[in-house]
Amino acid sequence: MQQPDTLDLLRRARARYTQKQLAEILEVDVRTVRRWEVRENEPPTYLSDAIRQRVLPLVNDVANDNTSFRFIDLFAGVGGIRLGFEAYGGQCVFTSEWNKFSQQTYLANFPETSSHTFVGDITQVDESDVPDHEILLAGFPCQPFSIAGVSKKNALGRPHGFECTTQGTLFFDVARIIAKKRPKAFLLENVKNLLSHDKGNTFKVILQTLREELGYEVHYKVIDGQHFVPQHRERILIVGFDGKTDFSWGDLKLPSKGSVTLSSILHPQNGSEAEEDPYTTGESAKVNSKYTLTPKLWKYLQDYAEKHRKAGNGFGFGLVDGDSVTRTLSARYYKDGSEILVSQGNKKRPRRLTPRECARLMGFPDTFKIPVSDTQAYRQFGNSVVMPVMKEVARIMVPHIQRLCDEKTANIKQASLFS
């Protein structure tokens, strides 16, 4: 029978380390750690001692270095931003994601989430009920704001500022939590078009809310995921700090674009990779034939592209091979896969990427579980973030967050001396 504290020790360790990191420290397979966590296998009797001797000293070292922090994961999707911040010692204490299929994938990969609050509709959550945290993470949807009638509402003494201009949008829910909980920092992610959305008004209101209404130091930058993965995917990242910092986007270490090509994420189909049903089959792990386009769909896409070529338009399918960098993977990829079609040779019909290849295209490790249908998986990865981008941004954010936390602690201690 297992020691009563074994799972608690495991949870403590997992608050700091990914399953892969923990597996390396304990010298076991990552699948073994997963089975312990989901109770498929009972942890062996030696695990308690192993965690105490090998893992907790490392956890304590991190704590003594003051590098731990708590974060909340809003509009979480399948957890791409979370993975990036967990890599630098973060602990998730609250999650919100409304889509039931994304919830399924998220919980399959972060089973420890069951130990903290996981809500579907963030609009129904009172900001006072959100736990304290140092960082707020949110990949919020892009919506227009109305600024009409603000002066009239001011004159009538009604709510104004972000309470007026952003009410009814999902950004409002981000703003009200920031206003109430005052995290030391936040990271917001959105599509590049947020900058020009509604003739620039949407982004103007967001910056005004974060800087003027909430008083945060704000930095923003458009980053192309192509620095880390073989995909052209531009996203705007908005970073804010509750205090003055010397944060600089110049501290990012971005590999050269094009240095990673599609061959790095495609199934090799030569037996060097284990079969993963239903994506690959047989000893050679060949891509399942169901991902090859039907003759009817392939003809339709060719005819469609030719029609627009003659009209002088640029619409058409995107045919790629191992030396390519792809277009942006979209949430509609499940429909026909036209933006990224993998060549299978002359006179052969191309194929879609498999969901596993889509996960790799977004920078997710192969240990990331995909428990949903292909259609839902394509939607989820098409809506996700490029995880290595999030990890790199976390790397340059965390030192500034820790300094702000240290300053707060010092001020509290100083105030107590004179109280």
Image: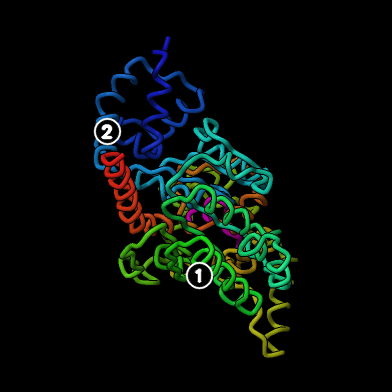
Q: In percent of the image, x 39 and y 19: which residue is there?
A: 6
User: In front here: 246 or 256?
Assistant: 246
For label 1, the residue is 234
Image location (x, y in percent) of residue 127 = 59, 45
Image: magenta residue range? 351-360
Judge whether residue 271 can be spotted in this image.
Answer: no
Image location (x, y in percent) of residue 266 = 48, 57
Image location (x, y in percent) of residue 279 = 57, 48
Q: Is residue 280 magenta?
A: no
Magenta: main secondary structure equals helix
Image location (x, y in percent) of residue 350 = 60, 65
Looking at the image, the residue that sits furthest to the front is 419
Q: Give residue 60's mark.
A: 2
User: In front here: 316 or 220?
Assistant: 220
Element carrying mark 2: helix
Judge whether residue 87 can be spotted in this image.
Answer: yes
